[in-house]
Image (cartoon, rainbow, N blue to C red):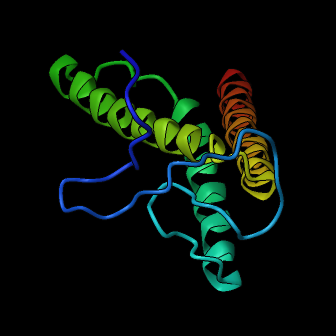
Amino acid sequence: MDMPNMPNMTDNGTNMDMNMQMSFYWGEHGTVLFSGWPNHRAGMYTLALFFVFFLSLGIEILSNQPPIRHGAKPALGVVVQAVVYFFRISFLYLVMLAVMSFNGGIFIAAVLGHSLGFFLAKFRAISMANRESSGLEQKVK
């Protein structure tokens, strides 16, 4: 039996528009993460871009943390790693949901944030490795 076309209604009787963009688009006309955000305002859209950029940057920095130091208490090390993992995964899911808005600017902000975060994390790792190797060379002399 065919059902008549019913409008999409919520429990309180209001109409909900459930159209979702399924291809990349540009500009502040869309929803990113939260209903009504950025609400077609350029300032809020810019805030959304920075938010996604810094979340992506944070993901890469948290992903490339140095291992637990030798001699650290195992329980404390595991707790610290679990807390870092919690935030990293939370940020990852938020960025994934933001990119699923199909907004081109949000996508570019996420890619740039990941790229800069990767660069900063690897730069720090190389700097630390060079510092440790120069410290070993001075001990040998």
Instruction: Report whether 128 appears left or right of 17.
Output: right
Of the pair 121 and 85, the residue shown nearer to us: 85
Taking 19 as reference, is 74 above or below it?
above
Instruction: Report whether 85 appears left or right of 24.
Output: left
Q: Number of marks in the image?
A: 0
Kindly give the residue lying farthest to the front in the view shown: 1
Q: Residue at x 78, y 42 (%)?
A: 115
Q: Residue at x 48, y 44 (%)?
A: 94
Spot occupied by residue 18 in the image (x, y as percentages of width and height): 50, 48
Taking 122 as reference, is 31 above or below it?
below
Of the pair 90 and 140, the residue shown nearer to us: 90
Spot occupied by residue 29 in the image (x, y as percentages of width and height): 70, 68
Instruction: Report whether 116 appears left or right of 17.
Output: right
Spot occupied by residue 50 in the image (x, y as percentages of width and height): 65, 67
In which quarter of the view is residue 34 placed?
bottom left
Of the pair 98 and 116, the residue shown nearer to us: 98
Q: Residue at x 30, y 19 (%)?
A: 71
Instruction: Report whether 138 appears left or right of 87.
Output: right
Of the pair 112 and 101, the residue shown nearer to us: 101
Spot occupied by residue 67 in the image (x, y as percentages of width and height): 46, 23
In which quarter of the view is residue 64 placed?
top right
Quick one: quadrant of the C terminus?
Answer: top right
